[in-house]
Amino acid sequence: MIHPIIRFDGVSKTYQRTFSDERVEALRCISFEVEPGEVCAFLGPNGAGKTTSIGILMGFLYADEGEASVLGYEPGDIRAKSRIGFLPENFAFYKHLTGPELLRFHLALAGINARGGEGRIGQLAKQVGLHGYEDLKVGKYSRGMVQRLGLAQALLAEPELLVLDEPTSGLDPAGRKEVLDLLNGLKAQGKTVFLSSHILPEVEQICDRVVIIDRGLLLRTGKLSDMLADAGQVEIVASGAGPELAMLLEPRPVEIETTPAGFRVVAGGALKREIAELLWNAGYDVVSINPLRSSLEDLFLKTVARRGRPS
């Protein structure tokens, strides 16, 4: 039996404000799983509870209720930690060290012989685009270079699970593409990746599973392919004369737009045949029916909008 790499089962976390009786529910009964070899996008607006969830996953925080496990162990168990590569959103490295010196330090923290890891350090420098900067102090690095060094640190011990919080932050478009290619390569190797990012079109290119939370509540989770298929819509283009369209198609959830040659109706895929027949029988000419592929960004915005998040 294959066990999930990450499992949250009814996890809740409440914070007590300092010098106040006010309590803030950061997470409320969150449940999801990530299977081995999946790239899972962990999404939510600012303040959704992502940082708290990652803190619990990494063993930095404790859940008030529910259970969580990572690689089959309780979060924070050293047997799990030794197999996880972690890149937080906000991190700081020793500025007086060079990149290789910093990676040697992290090798020692991981219990790996630094001499035996020299080849690994050189390989990672090339992999993340830092080759040629071996003598430069970290304090002289650009924001993007620091991000690349963070990725190298997360990959250093060849972990089974990567937990990445905004891994492309601070990178230019070329750098972001390099990171996506790197993650695709790790996915091909069977690594499991759990990542949080606000750049949804890029996330969509690599992720298998999506978890969406907002204000501490799980809104949706599942395979991305299934979610986009469920959200799939069609465009029905028609022309001709007939009864008032809005009245004809009421109360079906559709969007109607006038075009120079007639009009277009956007509706859920399950309604395409019914609407096409209604239009045809009412005297309109149905010119075409085309699928409209939904995107992760569309899915995310619609999911959060249904929750009623204030603007």
Image: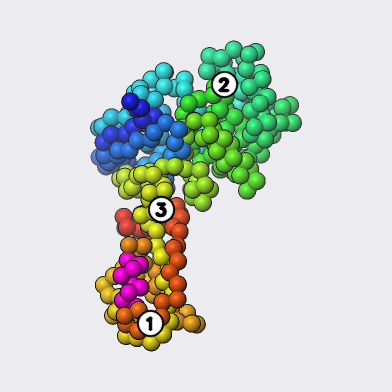
Magenta-tinted stretch? 271-279
Mark 3: few/some/many CA within 10 Å (<14, 14-19, 20+): some
> Mark on residue 284?
1
Location of mark 3 (residue): 228
Seen at 45% across and 66% down, the residue is 290
**Is label 3 in a helix, a strand or a loop?**
helix
Q: Quadrant of residue 305?
A: bottom left
Seen at 47% across and 43% down, the residue is 207
**Quadrant that contains the N terminus:** top left
Location of mark 2 (residue): 106
Q: Quadrant of residue 175?
A: top right
Q: Indicate which disc, 2 or 1, sits on the residue closer to the N terminus.
A: 2
**Residue 263 vertical placement versus 294 (above, below):** below
Q: Indicate which disc, 1 or 3, sits on the residue closer to the N terminus.
A: 3
Q: Quadrant of residue 185?
A: top right
Which amino acid does the dot numbered 2 rest on? His
Which amino acid does the dot numbered 1 rest on? Tyr
- Mark 2–mark 1 Cα distance, whole angstroms, equals 69 Å
Q: Is residue 48 visible?
A: no
Q: Is residue 256 visible?
A: yes
Which amino acid does the dot numbered 3 rest on? Leu
